Each structure stands twice: as structure tokens, then as C-alpha cells.
Image (cartoon, helix red, strand yellow):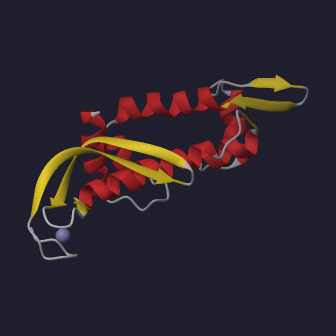
Amino acid sequence: MQCYVCDGEMSKVQKDVETTWKGKTVVFKGLSVYVCHSCGEEAYEPDDVKAMQYFIEGAIKQDNYPEIMNVEEVADFFRVSNQTIYNMLREGKLPAVKVGREWRFSREKIRAMVNQTEQLEQPAGIAARDDGLGLSKKDADIIARHLSDM
Ligand SMILES: [Zn+2]
């Protein structure tokens, strides 16, 4: 592979990639990176770039929710209607506490619930879920592979 900056020779190495996104630092360990011998320019595999974007966007999105979530936020998190959340509450399918007349949810518990579901359904669960990032079947497979490597 040739460097797109200086036309120098690039070779593939395994390294940790540190990236900063909206003030947060994320480290991806053991990525395959092409490094230029002449100018030091680095290039990543397109698959790795997609996986990195997926993880970062997911992490940022989840951090937007407060520690204690209300019905609207949980509905938004799962991308369902408020009514669906109320139905799930009635069926005892969501971990929640009632404060006065309002339901409140622990963000950690809601997240743990999603992780549990993903483990049960992998890898088909990831492919089937439309989380708004426009994941194709191929992308989902790549991400599932990365997850299993971690
Ligand atoms: Zn170069």
C-alpha cells in the first residue's frame, strides 16, 4: 500500500489507537494500522473506521441520558412509544421505581437490560436492530466480530 500523502511505502502494524471525541478519549487496542515509512502518516482499515464510529456514537448517545431516567427518556432510548413503556411497566418487564405518581428508571439498569438482550440474541440481534445508524448486515457482522475479540 502507498501513502496518500507522500507516496511512500506503508506497512501494516498492530497498535493501539487513541482518539478524542467531544472531550472524551477512547482507546481501541490492537487495531491493524498502515504506517508510512517516510512521513509517519497512519491509515486505518475501512472496517475498523466503521467499528470505531459505531462505538463512539453509541457511547456518546448513552451518555446523554441522566442517571435517573423518566418514561419519555426510556421510550426514546428504546425507540418505542411512551405507551409501550407503560405496557412493559404493567407487565413488570422494566426495572423501575414509582416516585409519587411518576415512574423513574436507573440508567445503569436499563443499559444492563439491553446488554443482556444483546448477549442472548447475538449476532442476529445486532443485525436485526435498527438503531438509526443505518447498519448494514455486513457492518453488523464486522461489529459482532470486534465485540467477540474484545
Ligand atoms: Zn507518507
Q: Residue at x 14, y 66 (%)?
A: 38
Residue 22 location (% of width, % of height): 56, 54
Q: Residue at x 22, y 76 (%)?
A: 5
User: Residue visible at 47% across and 52% down?
Assistant: 20
Residue 91 on image: x %, y %: 66, 27
Q: Residue furthest right?
A: 100
The residue drawn where x is 26% and y is 34% is 148
Quadrant containing ligand 1: bottom left
Q: Is residue 101 left or right of residue 93?
A: right
Note whether 23 is above or below 145 in the view shown: below
Is residue 63 found left or right of 148 in the rendered image? right
Front residue of 125 and 134: 134
Decide which of 133, 97 is in the foreground and name it. Answer: 133
Quadrant occupied by the C terminus: top left
Query: Which residue appears farthest toward the front when viewing the image?
Result: 38
Query: Horizontally, is 88 left or right of 8 in the view?
Result: right
Quarter of the figure that contains the N terminus: bottom left
- The answer, for residue 129, to whether it is visible in the render is no
Which of 74/21 is in front?
21
Image location (x, y in percent) of residue 83: 72, 44
Residue 121 appears anywhere in the view: yes
Quadrant location of residue 99? top right
